[in-house]
Image (spheres, coloured by chain):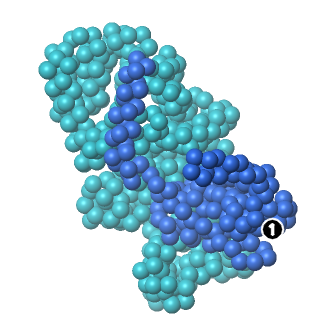
Chain colours: A cyan, B blue
Amino acid sequence: MGALETHRAIDAVWRIESARVIAGLARIVRDVGLAEELAQDALVVALERWPETGIPANPGAWLMATAKHRAIDTLRRNRLVERKHEELGHALAERERATPDLAAALDDDVGDDLLRLVFTCCHPVLSAEARVALTLRMLGGLSTDEIARAFLVPEPTVAQRIVRAKRTLAEKNVPFEVPRGAELAARLSSVLAVVYLVFNEGYSATAGVDWVRPALCEDALRLGRILAGLLPAEPEVHGLVALMEIQASRIPARVGPTGEPILLPDQNRTLWDRLLIRRGLAALARAEALGGARGPYALQAAIAACHARAATAAATDWTRIAGLYATLADVTPSPVVELNRAVAVGMAHGPAAGLALADALLAEPLLESYHLLPSVRADLLAKLGRAGEARAEYLRAARLTRNARERRLLEERAAQLAAGT
Amino acid sequence: MRVMMIVKATKDSEAGVMPGEPMLTDMMKFNEELTKAGVLLDLGGLKPSSKSARVRFSGSQRTVIDGPFAETKELIAGFWLLQVKSLEEAIEWAKRCPCPYDASDGDIEIRPLFDMSDFPEANAETLARANQIDQKIGR
């Protein structure tokens, strides 16, 4: 096997194994930052040795064992942390005694350790950006560079974010554990928010040139599916997966031949990925079977499912969608939900009804720089024949969006109204 | 990217002989691993070729040929559809599959799928045609 091939194979192994290795080490050393460093050290050794020896039969176990030995070596050499070494030595010795079969031990605890890692990376003591960066790094196996490119920030910024996040976790003595009881729901909510944030950045990019970045959606979907496997009894996890699968099904239809955005009413539905729709509907059914029909993600997934079931835009059950938004507004009231409800009501009961709801949001401070409010108003005004006002709103929306493709789409709509088309 | 991982038939699978217990459990665990890793999209096992048919295309002629078919080693017996970052990742997963070939050597084949980004012109054409159809049905 050539050197390049081996490196690519090692990359693949890292993508499959790194989260588990980091999680397992974190349980032993009780420090996520240190755990990742140890795992990276083991990767370096793998990159040196495996081109000669070939990839071992159980690469995960090899990386884990190597990392643990490095941990002991490092701590032995560093007299300043002799006490920690003793503790670590004891902890390791105890684990060695209790779990002679490393592979079996890894299997038993892997799920729990991964969950601990998930909740730690998404801990509320960290900023939203830090949680995203740490989660993508530790659980997604993305490099700092990949994360930087995904969010269009410079790589040193991401690197700093991760360094600071690890330091914060250590300084605040954040325990490496899965929250329990009442705390679990809130903490889970923050985990799901991180995953959905990543998905959204790929589905409807907030900045930059490309409207859609499918690789990010794939990363988020993978994380979501992993979570569904770790927390199979949590309906909102399945709800989120359902939402992402169904939204992702539309990606092939979302972008035109020259990269321009194609919005839902205009999409070629034969391009929708039916496999993902099927998976999404199955995940939604699981969420509902677990009693989670009123969960926010399940509700949003149910709305997405309404679109998925409509063979054409005209066949969409807007009344049902409007009803689902009303329930969502009840469960998680927010101006954005209300705006989406305005769209649905406009489709179900006519543009005047929709505009009445949208107008009520003009005073909402949270939506002040939200480009979709003027965009929605523009659409409704146009349908009511108020072309001049509609055009002004499209231009206002174009000024507010940070995405170049979307700006162009909005400007074109304004231009079409001026030309009287 | 998506890949299809393909397992070929064996004398046993063609004879309708179900795999034994250790194999069934190992395969189930492997499928669970794929699921837990978030890479499994779909999977399926194909019935023996004795239950199948072929439509032979020869010029404008169409003939139906009933199974079973002789070339066991070339017949597809099962497949997985995976979502992976690279072909190398799929290869790594394939290596972890419990060996489906008892008696002799065999391959698990990994075939990447085309996706929409491979056909930018076709997209434009399909879209135009779909819009025409939409207009006809008065969308």
Residue toward you, B96 or A207: B96
Residue toward you, A246 or A219: A246
Q: Quadrant of residue B19?
A: bottom right
Indicate the position of residue A76 as horizontal and vertical percent values. 50, 88
Residue toward you, A115 or A7: A7
Q: Residue at x 47, y 57 (%)?
A: B1
Question: In the rendered view of the protein, which quadrant contains the C terminus of chain B?
Answer: top left
Q: Against A255, is A46 above or below? A: below
Indicate the position of residue B22 as horizontal and vertical percent values. 82, 67
User: Under tag 1, what secondary structure?
Assistant: helix
**Residue reaching furthest to the left:** A418
**Residue reaching furthest to the front:** B60
Whether residue A404 appears in this view of the structure is: yes
User: A264 left or right of A180?
Assistant: left
Indicate the position of residue A414 as horizontal and vertical percent values. 18, 25
User: B105 left or right of A302?
Assistant: right
Q: Residue at x 44, y 24 (%)?
A: A313
Badge 1 density bin: few <14, some 14–19, many ≥20, Cα 10 Å: few
Q: Amino acid at mark 1?
A: Lys
Q: Against A110, is A334 above or below? A: above
Indicate the position of residue A96 as horizontal and vertical percent values. 68, 80
Q: Against B93, is A248 above or below? A: above
Q: Against A73, is B114 above or below? A: above
Q: Residue at x 50, y 84 (%)?
A: A1
Q: Residue at x 63, y 57 (%)?
A: B80
User: A61 left or right of A352?
Assistant: right
**Subunit under mark 1:** B
Residue corresponding to mark 1: B11
